[in-house]
Amino acid sequence: MQDTTAPPYPKPEENSMAEHGIRGSADTPLALHPLVYLDDGEEVTIGRPDTDSYAIFPPDGAQLVRRLARGATPAQASDWYAAEYGERADVEDVIDALRELGFIRGADEKPGAVEPVRWQRLGRALFSPFAWICYAAIVLWAVLRMVMSPDLVPTPQDLLFSDYYAVISIVLLVAAVPLIAIHEAFHALAARRLGVRSRTRMSYRFYFLVVETALDGLVAVERRKRYLPIVAGMVADCVLLGLLIAVADTARAPDGALSLTSRVCLGLAFAALLRLLWQFFLYLRTDVYVLITTMLGCVDLHTTSIRLLRNRLLRLLGRTDKLADESPWHPVDRRAARWYSWLIVVGYTVSLGTFVLALAPVLVRMVSGAVDRYGSGGHAGWVGLVDSSVFLLLTFGQLALTIWIAARERTRSRRSRTHHVIA
């Protein structure tokens, strides 16, 4: 979701408009861009769909914005608020927030227009009842075949489907592009069928290089309708995993042994299984994290949980002077962080365990095998040396890319000020 700064809630004021003053004319209506409103319990999300700028208001603040959007002057809106709630609102603060969010039009600015969202038909087709039946059939068939033939269960050793390490790396790298693209496309199309736009960007989480799909417009969609766009990528992963296992089973040799095609499919299936498993490493802010925060109505559960863990550690060390102030935390975040913060610790532990137990042995075997070829006295041949060189270049090149993206993200975060994340 796009980071946006939530405007200050209207505050009670004892003085009249004339006494506390409004910059500009209090008797001139504001020109606002077309806005959308979503009432969600004790909060109302207001946004500008054409720029994906959204913020959360309390119900009374949202009513004040609605008055201004319908053409009421700041003075009229203030008088209405005073009559409705028995106290005056700091209308100027609200107007400043609306201006910062880009909701107020300039003198020569035209009203924002939302362009039609493309691929809505495709999105509806991919999540139609018939499509769900097909997805379920693929996954159930794959599960049945794995139960009947345990050699179809993906394992780390399936990654070693060739004696040439560069071939393994290239196949995994090339295949990862469409697999990740399908995952992200399912997110985007599940949202686009609701009229929500999307965009993607590359980032990193812990030691993972990831591609993220931004669906900022979901905050203006009814909460129950947000769940499918959030989990759609995992649906795609499960279907792709089932298809790869089915192909591996179909491509067996005449004697029933796994063919090269079968081994490649199982290697890709294990990589897909890892991506699916990573969605449950909740500290990564992955699909499952977004699903939980959406269901609970959290604002920034991750940051709150990290700060809560830090406070616990500081109390344990007796450094109470370094404790973070917990009063500004959203109450929903504070309640959920009491148990979610421990899941972050578990997530890091499981991630490290997965790397050490599943990925590291295979990686060490491939790297050591590639390096040994240089000291084999020419026995590896030029093909083996080229294979080792390409493999090492790809392996450490991906590592360098991850470090570069991490450094770039850290630099950007230092330059930008803190924002409230709207879940």
Image (cartoon, rainbow, N blue to C red):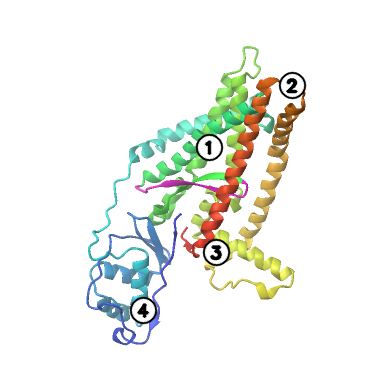
Report if the CB atoms under discs 4 and 1 are less than 8 Å apart: no
Question: N-terminal of the two: label 1 or label 2?
Answer: 1
Distance in Å between CA atoms under marks 4 and 1? 49 Å
Residue kind at label 1, given as amino acid type: Asp
Distance in Å between CA atoms under marks 3 and 4? 27 Å
Residue kind at label 3, given as amino acid type: Asp
Magenta-tinted stretch: 195-207
Q: In the rendered image, which residue does mark 1 sit on?
A: 237
Q: Along the line of sight, which residue is nearer the eye, 411 or 219?
A: 411
Q: In the rendered image, which residue does mark 4 sit on?
A: 90
At horizontal 62% and vertical 33% (from top left) the residue drawn is 270
> Magenta span has 203?
yes
Question: N-terminal of the two: label 4 or label 1?
Answer: 4
Q: Which mark is residue 155?
A: none
Residue kind at label 4, given as amino acid type: Asp
Nearer the viewer's eye, disc 2 or disc 3? 2
Q: Is residue 333 above or below residue 366?
A: below
Report if the CB atoms under discs 3 and 4 are less than 8 Å apart: no
Question: N-terminal of the two: label 1 or label 3?
Answer: 1
The kind of secondary structure element at disc 2 is loop
The kind of secondary structure element at disc 4 is loop
Distance in Å between CA atoms under marks 1 and 3? 30 Å
Q: Which mark is residue 333?
A: 3
| Image coordinates for residue 414, horizontal then vertical, percent | 54, 61
Q: Is residue 18 visible?
A: yes
Q: In the rendered image, which residue does mark 2 sit on?
A: 378
- Crowding at dot 3, Cα within 10 Å, few <14 / some 14-19 / many 20+, comes out as many
